[in-house]
Image: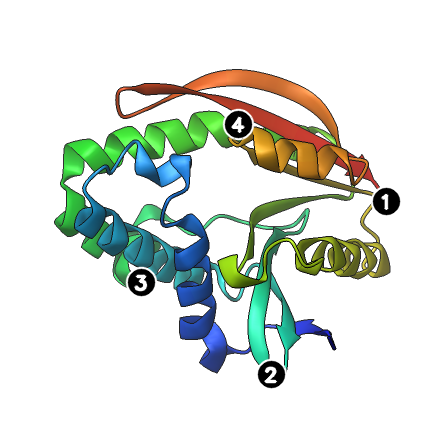
Amino acid sequence: MGFEFGVLKREELSEAVELSFRAYEYYEYFLYAFPDLEMRRKVIRSVLFGTWRAVMQKSHFLTVKIDGKIVGLAVLEDPYYKRPSDIQFLLYGWWKVFCNAGIKRVNAWIDMDESAGKACHDYQHDGENIWYCSSLTVDPPFQGQGVGTRLIAFMEEYIRERGGKQLTLFTNSEKNLAFYKNRKFEVFDYREVVNGKTVMGSWSVKKSL
């Protein structure tokens, strides 16, 4: 199995969104907040399109391909990343998220997302040369085949080449947490976040490079 690593091209964005959609479709992060399947599918796609279109010039999108097909994607924020304004997010498509799920439900999910990511963002801003991974996905048919491990190795090399010293991210999945621990990430924050009517664990992890 031959792996090809690179940077996402703008014309590949739709392919990257569909890959990540498949990975997130039944992920607790979306599942509990948007239990209706059709609504959840619309929300995930519109969140990914709206967010990634807004940040594509500000973030680093890394891919791993097999036979020319994207099977893994990582989205990184470097230490100089500046979040687009709320207006920019809306203009790039986030208005569809609110249309698909309603303002109250979406705002509750945003509050959960901000709470879950707070420890990582605070840690990044309080240190030097720290990168943040906002999304790491592997297409479900290719999970368990070493794609994620190789993508992390490529991420780490990419960050080191640009002067990065540490990498941080968070997960709400104990399975994913075990995956990161096995790759020498360490937990530096644990908190509980509310997603819909469900309370979930949220683990922030970091790794020195």
| Distance between the alpha carbons at the discs numbered 3 and 2 | 28 Å
Q: Is label 4 or label 2 in front?
A: 2
Q: Secondary structure at mark 3?
A: helix
Residue at 48 percent of width and 78 percent of height: 12
Say if 102 sits above or below 114 in the image.
Answer: below
* Of callouts 1 and 4, the N-terminal one: 4
Tell me if residue 102 can be seen.
Answer: yes
Q: Is residue 141 left or right of residue 18?
A: right
SS under mark 2 = loop
Residue 148: image quadrant is: bottom right
Is residue 121 at all visible to an observer of this figure? no
- At 61% from the left edge and 31% from the top edge, which residue is drawn? 120
Image quadrant in which the C terminus is located: top right
Q: Nearer the N terminus, badge 1 or badge 3?
A: 3
Query: Given contact means CB atoms under 8 Å apart, are the residues at marks 4 and 2 in contact?
Result: no
Amino acid type, residue under disc 2 in the picture:
Gly
Q: Who is closer to the viewer here, 3 or 97?
A: 3
Alpha carbons under labels 1 and 2: distance apart: 29 Å
Give the quadrant of the N terminus: bottom right
The amino acid pointed to by label 4 is Lys
Amino acid at dot 3? Tyr
Can you tell which mark lies on residue 92? 3
For mark 1, what is the residue? Answer: 209
Q: Quick one: label 4 or label 2, which is nearer the N terminus?
A: 2
User: Which amino acid type is shown beneath numbered disc 1?
Assistant: Leu
Looking at the rendered structure, the number of numbered marks drawn on it comes to 4
Q: Position of residue 186 (x, y in %)?
A: 76, 28
Residue 27 in which image quadrant: top left
Instruction: Tell me if 118 is positioned left or right of 110 in this view.
Output: right
